[in-house]
Image (spheres, grey):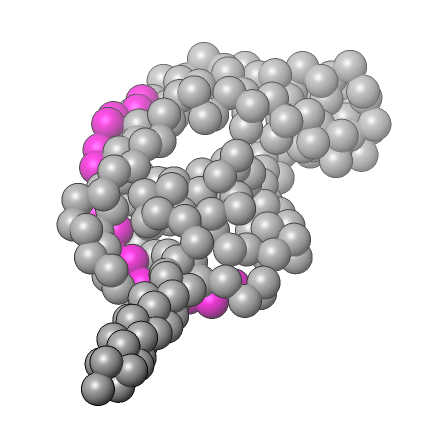
Amino acid sequence: MQKKFLFSIFSVLMIFCLTACGSEAEKPKFSADKSILGWAEMDAFGNSANIAATGMDKAQQEQLSNAVVKGTTELLTAFPVSDVCLDKFAKDYFSQLPAKMNISTKIKKDDAEHPVVEVTANVIDVSKVNDIASKSENLAQITLAMEQLHEKGVTDEQIKNDAEFQQELAATFVKYLDEMPLIQKTYDVTCKIAQGEDGNLYYVPEDGDALKKFLGGL
């Protein structure tokens, strides 16, 4: 009788242990707030110290990083800029952006499967962008410089090959974007669980496009 009782207790403990261990293994590797911080930083800057919490592999990281940089530098391609100029602009601009945007996250709704994370960031105040652009001295300087060079017969290709002028262009573009007004906003990100390429589970945004729009001030 005693043996049967002990066996029953042992069986119950084994089932409890297996259930608990299984649940633990199915939990995401990182907390929701840390994972969403990694996603937000990648979407905004193209890099993040919290990249491990997103579950992205190297190829996914590189693809997103390139997309973020390209999306910003495309604004400059209306001017005759060289690849060197674009690279310098991207390096200088994105090195300053994290401190300006000051992205932070906190868990607003603690839920095992669909937690909600509040994201706070300083984003562009799009209601004032057109006004700033029309009054920007830096943008006016760029436009005037181009007009004067073209009047002198200088071609776009020659402008691209003028290393000193391209350096000045990159610096002027950074100053122009620095003029963009920022406003602090918050956005609630509902999460879901997804499996990373490494086989582990991670929290990811249910609507990644909506997070990108928020970070872009939209």
Residue 53 percent coordinates (x, y): 47, 47
- Residue 194, compared with residue 172, is above or below; it is below
Residue 207 percent coordinates (x, y): 32, 60
Query: Residue at image x 55%, y 55%?
Result: 56
Residue 82 as seen in the image, left or right of residue 68: right
User: Looking at this rendering, what residue extends furthest in the front direction?
Assistant: 1
Residue 84 seen in the current view: yes
Which quarter of the figure is the C terminus placed in? top left
Residue 30 percent coordinates (x, y): 41, 49
- Residue 114, compared with residue 140, is above or below; it is below
Residue 35 as seen in the image, left or right of residue 96: left
Instruction: Looking at the picture, tell me which residue is in the foreground, 123 or 10.
Output: 10
Residue 50 as seen in the image, left or right of residue 116: right
- Residue 206, compared with residue 80, is above or below; it is below
Query: Residue at image x 26%, y 86%?
Result: 4
Residue 71 seen in the current view: no
Residue 194 as seen in the image, left or right of residue 149: left
Q: Quadrant of residue 135?
A: top left
- Per the picture, the main secondary structure of the magenta-coloured stretch is strand
Q: Quadrant of residue 23?
A: bottom left
Instruction: Looking at the picture, tell me which residue is in the foreground, 114 or 186.
Output: 114
Would you say residue 186 sits in the magenta stretch? yes
- What range of the chain is rendered magenta? 181-196
- Residue 33, compared with residue 127, is above or below; it is below
Question: Number of labelled discs?
Answer: 0
Residue 123 percent coordinates (x, y): 32, 32
Instruction: Looking at the picture, tell me which residue is in the foreground, 70 or 41.
Output: 41
